[in-house]
Amino acid sequence: MPITAKDIAINFVAGGVMVAGTAYLATKVSSKAAALFWALPLTLMPILLFLYYKKASQEDIADFVGRLVPSLLIFVVYVLVLWAALRKTTFWRAVVVSVAVFLILAALFWVLIPPSEKIKIV
């Protein structure tokens, strides 16, 4: 079963709900509430369900989830650098520095972690 416009629209809406919900909570409730909402696996679940219902093998799904671990570690380092930089310098300098760190770590991940096959969906 190929990826359809409906599949893309559902994923787009799920992502939009996360962005809008996080922004709403940050501005109307608290940054803590927004951070907890953002940390929910709501963005991961639609991906996993999409792969499952498109008949990706459990092995492929497990490989995808396993590759999230180093990606999440890279993201944690990015957030920590951004947080530390925001306390010491201007907003844009903090953004540039943290994105540069992210890009360096992402490049290392890309080079050092062996590639996997594309996930096959039916």
Image (cartoon, grey):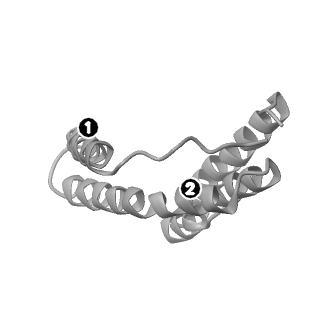
- The image quarter containing residue 8 is top right
Q: Left of 55 or right of it: where is 44?
A: left
Please state which of residues 23 and 68 is positioned toward the viewer in this rendering: 68
Q: Left of 92 or right of it: where is 54?
A: right
Residue type at mark 1 is Trp
Between tags 1 and 2, which lies in front? 1
**Relative to 17, does residue 4 appear above or below in the rendering?**
above
Total count of labels: 2
**Relative to 14, does residue 40 appear above or below in the rendering?**
below
Residue 40 placed where, x, y %?
A: 61, 67
Label 1: element kind: helix
Q: In which quarter of the image is the C terminus?
A: top right
**Relative to 96, does residue 80 appear above or below in the rendering?**
below
**Circle on res. 34:** none
**Circle on res. 27:** 2
Which residue is identified by label 1? 92
Please state which of residues 104 and 35 is positioned toward the viewer in this rendering: 104
Residue type at mark 2 is Thr
Label 2: element kind: helix
Query: At 24% across and 53% down in the image, what residue appears?
Result: 86
Query: At 41% across and 61% down in the image, what residue appears?
Result: 72
- The image quarter containing residue 80 is bottom left
CA distance for labels 1 and 2: 21 Å
Query: At 52% across and 43% down in the image, what residue appears?
Result: 117
Residue 35 placed where, x, y %?
A: 51, 65
